[in-house]
Image (spheres, grey):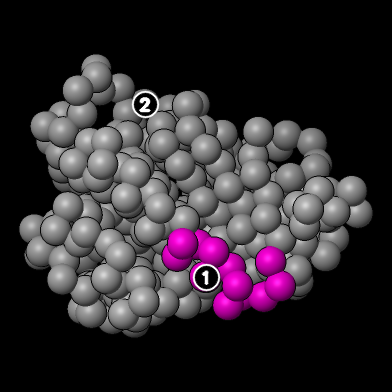
Amino acid sequence: MPELKILPDTRSVAHVAADAIVSAAESAIAARGHFTIALSGGNTPENLYRLLATEQYRAQIDWANTYIFWGDERCVPPDHRDSSYRMAREALLDHVPLPAGNIFRMRGEDEPHSAAEAYEQGLRDFFTRREADVLVQPRFDLILLGMGDDGHTASLFPNTDAVDERSRWVIAHYVPRVEMWRISLTAPAINAARQIMFLVTGAGKADTLREVLTGPHRPRQLPAQLVQPVDGRLIWLVDQAAAARLPDGMQRAADA
């Protein structure tokens, strides 16, 4: 069952998420010798990344054994203002002792389909070397996700072919709503993770959050509903503004 945590504000969401990342990293490195995390773009994750770059958190993570991936990317160069890689680099990666070889970005500047195929092959190479069990999907230790006010997550947008993909790990597709090509992990790749953590903040997402968590199962219209880990933990960290339209009973249970 998904875990729901309702927190006072965006700052609180970032702090709880940072603590969870530290804990996940410690557990993964103790168990397997490395920690793999896929990052998300957006304002809420940016606050989290800046927090992780502070001395309080930076010193708690074994960066030499941490490997950074992305859940999705806009098809722009890495120095473009819309690049999720650029945001993460400026907010976090430039400020921690992470080896350059531990960073696996999606190449948004390349032809989209070629970039998606290359990223998938890179994932296959990486996880095949490090996971002992038979590799069907990449097994990230933690994937960070956001949710748009339209119910999209990663770059899986409503009513697009991307939400129907079941064989690929990574896809590229043109999203008419945002008039841009995107690269994204697919639902099966996301759902193979050991832990998935949604960060959702702001009143503008309250209606959609209610539909995703309590409404009928309509994943083509609400792709965030696709996220159902096969053998992992699913956590929703939301602020009070985003949780305002949830049923009272759900809010009380989350606050308990």
Pick the front one: 173 or 116: 116
The magenta segment is 7-19
Q: Which residue bears the numbered disc 1?
A: 14
Q: CA distance from mark 2 to mark 1?
A: 33 Å
Q: Which residue bears the numbered disc 2?
A: 167
> Are the residues tagged 2 and 1 within 8 Å (C-beta)?
no
**Mark 1 residue type:** Ala
Secondary structure of the residue carrying numbered label 1: helix
Where does the image place residue 167, in percent across and percent down from the top left? Answer: 36, 26
Where does the image place residue 105, in percent across and percent down from the top left? Answer: 22, 59
Asked if the stretch drawn in magenta spans residue 17, the answer is yes
Pick the front one: 187 or 62: 62
Secondary structure of the residue carrying numbered label 2: loop
Q: Does the image show residue 72?
A: no
Q: Of circles 2 and 1, which is in front?
A: 1
Query: Which residue shows up at 62% across the image and 52% down it?
Result: 236
Pick the front one: 136 or 3: 3
Asked if the stretch drawn in magenta spans residue 66, the answer is no
Where does the image place residue 2, in percent across and percent down from the top left? Answer: 64, 39
Vertical relation: 147 (above or below) 212: below
Of labels 2 and 1, earlier in sequence is 1
